[in-house]
Image (spheres, helix red, strand yellow):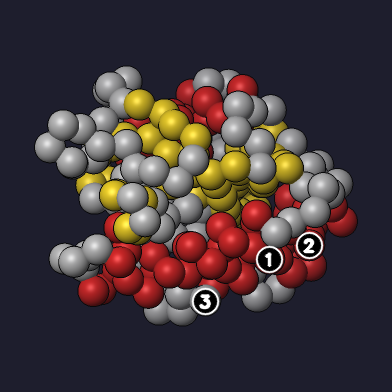
Amino acid sequence: MNIAIIGASGRLGGAIAREALARGHEVMAIGRNPAAPAAIRGARAVPADLDDPDSIAGAVAGSDVIVSSVTDRTTADRSRIPATAALLLELAPRAGVRRIAFVGGGGSLYVAPGLRAVDAPGFPKRYRAEALAQAEALRILEGAGDDVEWTYLSPPPQYLLPGEKTGRYVVRAGDEAVVDADGDSAITDGDFAAVLVDELEQNRFPRRRFTAGS
């Protein structure tokens, strides 16, 4: 499979790129600075910029799927996240790509009936803007037509931990967070990447949000 990853130089994008490469897939690491994704051994670095839609369309042309991992918390402009969802829905058909996999947020997952994590007491203030931006990106994807088959993977709303694959997690479709008996939920970077690449290979959740945690 030929996988184009936007944001491959980031924490999760890099983990996904490495997992895909380890499984024998071809990876195009797309980024504004080609030197950063070039550090992912085995990936083909392709310079392109979300502010230049034509460059993105040219970069992803010929791919089987586009993975968007524009979720870095150091990004000041949170509006980039929903804008990326809208842009890829527009550009993918032009580039001849049918599938988009969006690395989403966990803040809009429900942690109790009618209560999203982002609206719960104690949700970290510094992450609220990003969580709402990710929720808007999901809304945009859900309103898409039939030209593109998308999927949206949410990490747990609490703990996305540095670490390798453990294989100890539950995958679930829908808007409810996966939690343990104490109401906690966590996943490592390695496990999150494995869940995303599993979906690229198996296509179990087309046009749906899904999540994973332990």
Q: Is residue 104 above or below residue 4?
A: below
Query: In the rendered view of the protein, which quadrant contains the N terminus?
Result: top right
Q: How far from the left and from the top, in percent, is residue 30?
A: 60, 54
Identify which amino acid the numbered label 2 is placed on.
Answer: Glu
Identify which amino acid the numbered label 1 is placed on.
Answer: Ala
Q: Quadrant of residue 184?
A: top left
Q: Which residue is mark 1?
A: 86
Q: How far from the left and from the top, in percent, is residue 108?
A: 40, 58
Q: How far apart are the two marked residues, 3 and 2, measured between alpha carbons?
A: 17 Å
Work out whether residue 32 can be spotted: no
Left or right, 48 with respect to 164, comes to right
Q: Is residue 186 above or below residue 95?
A: above
Q: How far from the left and from the top, in percent, is residue 113?
A: 33, 50
Sort mark 1 into few (<14), some (14-19) or many (20+) by Cα contacts within 10 Å: some
Looking at the image, do the residues carrying marks 1 and 2 touch, with CB atoms under 8 Å apart?
A: yes
Q: How far from the left and from the top, in percent, is residue 144?
A: 74, 56
* Element on which disc 1 rests: helix
As drawn, the label of residue 90 is: 2
Q: Between residues 77 and 8, which one lies in front from this camera angle?
A: 77
Q: Which residue is mark 3?
A: 79
Q: Residue at x 25, y 37 (%)?
A: 179
* Element on which disc 3 rests: loop
Q: Between residues 52 and 131, which one lies in front from this camera angle?
A: 131
Left or right, 7 with respect to 144, comes to left
Q: How far apart are the two marked residues, 1 and 3, measured between alpha carbons?
A: 11 Å
Work out whether residue 91 can be spotted: yes
Q: Between residues 138 and 43, which one lies in front from this camera angle?
A: 138
